[in-house]
């Protein structure tokens, strides 16, 4: 999830663990703990682009990281606040939950987390977009209300608890909506007599009203969307996998690593004599556009060693404005 959401969740976790003893310091250190796992993006800046993608939401988003880092950070903070009534164990417990709730929340997004690192297993429930105002804003309001009250206030605890309950309730709702939308997609495929081997669904940006689906039909994918306000049947666009275009690079290390990151959901595009690896898990900017542009697309560039380097396709700010306008219109039905 986005940084603000992780700060809010971390602060709420800190308050729940230690707010009664140390007041707003619990929120402060909980917020810090909630941001620490995303420091892997800073590490990635010193690595090659492909390795940076691979480590994102890896070790730092695991239960192992939470267990190892919590006592270290707890010890450090206990020395800073020697006069506080909280013990080293108290601070360690706060940091454990602040660190752990971060990957638990990220596991609900499309990218997911390697929560059980070093085991090669990524949790990605794909039931919420990385920025969802309906999850974050009510949570933030309750946190601010709690922050303004004395640490011993019963209302402070109540507001913080309400924030956790409301946000968790919304998360449960998104799982239900995912299940309903999944059924709508499969019903549409059956109604159109489309044979498929696998289907992957996720919410559109900033909401859980509009949902996208990728459908594997063998040599191609079908892409479709569904809004809960739709009145017309779901239609699908066909995208060829086009993996033969890779030629001698089809089994190259770079392609295999990218394929693993994309969990097999990828198609190859050819533009201006260049090859592009399109990760389908994150969909396209605008499914109604004539020329589909994928959110995560990497140009494959042969190097002097007859291997492939990658260059991530840049995003056009002006095009993004049009995408947001189209998204808003599409949410309200076809």
Image (cartoon, grey):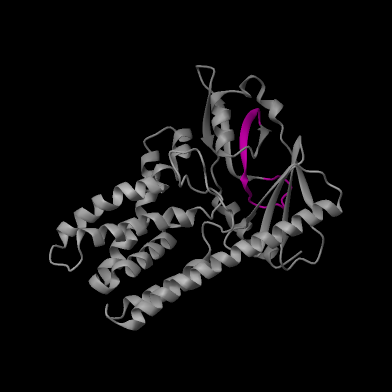
Q: Locate residue 306: give its quadrant.
A: top right
In the displayed structure image, the side of residue 189 where residue 49 appears, left or right: left
Residue in the foreground of this view, choosing between 86 and 210: 86
Residue 317: x percent and y percent? 54, 52
Residue 212: x percent and y percent? 68, 54
Residue 319: x percent and y percent? 60, 52
Q: Locate residue 152: give its quadrant.
A: bottom left
Residue 289: x percent and y percent? 71, 50
In the rendered image, residue 185 lying in the magenta stretch gets the answer: no
The boundaries of the magenta stretch are: 272-292
Residue depicted at x 58% and y 29%: 255
In the displayed structure image, the side of residue 74 where residue 237 appears, left or right: right
Judge whether residue 201 can be spotted in this image: yes
In the displayed structure image, the side of residue 233 where residue 94 appears, left or right: left
Residue depicted at x 44% and y 62%: 5
Residue in the foreground of this view, choosing between 234 and 176: 176
């Amino acid at each position: 999830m986005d940084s603000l959401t992780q700060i809010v969740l971390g602060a709420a976790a800190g308050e729940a663990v230690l707010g009664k003893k140390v007041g707003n310091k619990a929120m402060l250190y909980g917020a810090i703990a909630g941001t620490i796992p995303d420091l892997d993006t800073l590490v990635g800046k010193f690595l090659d682009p492909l390795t940076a993608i691979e480590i994102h939401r890896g070790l730092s988003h695991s239960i192992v990281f939470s267990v190892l880092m919590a006592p270290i950070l707890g010890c450090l903070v206990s020395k800073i606040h020697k006069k506080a009534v909280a013990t080293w164990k108290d601070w360690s417990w706060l940091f454990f939950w602040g660190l752990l709730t971060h990957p638990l929340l990220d596991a609900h997004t499309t990218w997911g987390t390697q929560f059980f690192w070093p085991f090669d297993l990524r949790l990605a429930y794909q039931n919420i977009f990385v920025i969802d105002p309906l999850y974050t804003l009510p949570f933030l309001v309750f946190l601010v209300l709690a922050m303004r009250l004395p640490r011993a206030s019963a209302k402070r605890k109540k507001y913080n608890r309400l924030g956790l309950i409301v946000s968790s309730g919304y998360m449960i709702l998104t799982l239900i909506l995912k299940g309903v939308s999944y059924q709508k997609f499969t019903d549409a495929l059956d109604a159109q007599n489309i044979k498929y081997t696998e289907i992957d669904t996720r919410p559109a940006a900033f909401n859980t009203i509009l949902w996208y689906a990728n459908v594997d039909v063998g040599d191609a994918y079908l892409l479709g969307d569904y809004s809960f306000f739709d009145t017309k049947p779901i239609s699908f666009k066909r995208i060829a996998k086009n993996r033969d275009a890779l030629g001698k690079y089809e089994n190259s290390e770079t392609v295999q690593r990218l394929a693993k990151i994309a969990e097999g959901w990828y198609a190859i595009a050819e533009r201006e004599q260049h090859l592009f690896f399109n990760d389908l898990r994150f969909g396209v900017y605008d499914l109604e556009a004539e020329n589909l542009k994928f959110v995560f697309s990497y140009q494959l560039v042969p190097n002097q060693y007859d291997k492939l380097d990658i260059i991530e396709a840049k995003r056009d700010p002006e095009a993004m404005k049009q995408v947001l306008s189209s998204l808003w219109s599409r949410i309200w039905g076809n």
